[in-house]
Amino acid sequence: MDAPGVLRERRALRAAGLVGGPIELIDVVLPLWAGAALGLSATEVGALVAVVVAFSLVARPVARVLVDRWERRHTAAVGALLYAFACAGYAVAQSAPLAYGAAAVGGVGGTLLWVAVRAIARERQADDTEAFLRVASARDAGSMVTTALGLVFFGIIGFAGVFWACAAMCVLAAALLVAGPGRPESAGESPGEDGVESGGDGQEEAAAGQGRLRAAVAEALTTAAEAAVGLLLVLHLQRGFDLGVVQVVLVFVPGSMVAGVAVLHVRRYVSRYGRTRVLAVGSLVGCAATLGFAAAPNPYVIAALWVLSGAAWGAVLSVRRAVADAAARPVLGMHDTAGLVGLLIGSLAAGVLYDGAQWWAACVAAAGMILVGAVVLMSAVRPLGDVDVPLAKA
């Protein structure tokens, strides 16, 4: 029989997969639905996505308090139910205000869920150092399954059917969490999200602090660029090439899968060449692919360039996570907040750029953000210590 702590984490990971799938699918479907069903402009679509992120930011302090003072699986269940309510709101929304309201609820729900699930994973961190990786893997697995089902059935059930199905999955996740075991008394206290290791002399601590700040700024810049490029492409495929939902998702799926694979397999190259070199190459490739979007004559070329971007961003993401881990342990506080700020900026920028600038200018701006973020992140490696080539410490 599994120990209560193992069963507790397993239930949380299953719930993460059940909710992670709808979240990833709706990230793509939401801007398409907003344009097709509600007739929102690109700027308004960017604002809709930004509302989700803004309320995620607002909810983070509340979520951190709840996971410390309340049963974490209940906090996660509330988050799943709120996201289900948001999906239902999208399904029935006939106007922009209702859509924005649903987006706000979804932002709060997603934050409560992920902060609580990660806290449950940290309960066993002393015995299992790959707990965080399994949370991300559960979300990725749920995303692939949900996306595949969405592609198969979208033509039959449409936007409303997709939203209702996502809501049902979130309700199921909430039930799974509530039915799970409580926190074992033997479970160790997990560190606070914003905890940072201290120690060493003042000069070393000052350098580390500078590195942490640079890493957080780089996270915001890089995430903003990724969010801007992704939303710009969704808008361009729908409005520039007149593609339907299934066609747009088919363009995105291969690149997303490649990014997930790259994150897992780039470690061998990091160990051999160092993080700064891998980061430099990945950023340059991502920048080149983004510039290529400006001249892409058809969706097939965009799909190929998106696969190239996926490989590059997967490599960059792996380095970002490693540098973040060296900057602040655990990484869920300052770095997650910086990433959300980047998502907020990127979403707003994408809508404004698509409406107010030439397509090529929007791509050039996004490519510039990628390069700036890479330069800042590379400047953070040395102040954080010997983290460039991990095996050098062995």
Image (cartoon, helix red, strand yellow):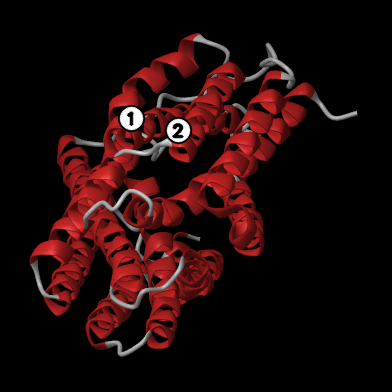
Residue type at tag 2: Gly
Question: Which dot marks residue 101?
Answer: 1
User: What is the crowding at mark 2: few (fewer than 14 residues within 10 Å), some, or many (at least 20)?
Assistant: many
Q: Is residue 113 visible?
A: yes
**Label 2–label 1 contact, CB within 8 A:** yes
Find residue 148 and report its horizontal and vertical position in percent. 64, 62
Q: Secondary structure at mark 1?
A: helix
Find residue 367 and report its horizontal and vertical position in percent. 20, 73
Find residue 87 and report its horizontal and vertical position in percent. 49, 37
Which of 47/136 is in front? 47
Q: Is residue 184 left or right of residue 222?
A: right
Q: Is residue 193 left or right of residue 276?
A: right
Residue type at tag 1: Gly
Give the residue displayed 60% in from the left and 26% down from the top.
Answer: 123
96 to 113, vertically: above or below:
below
Which of 287/157 is in front? 157
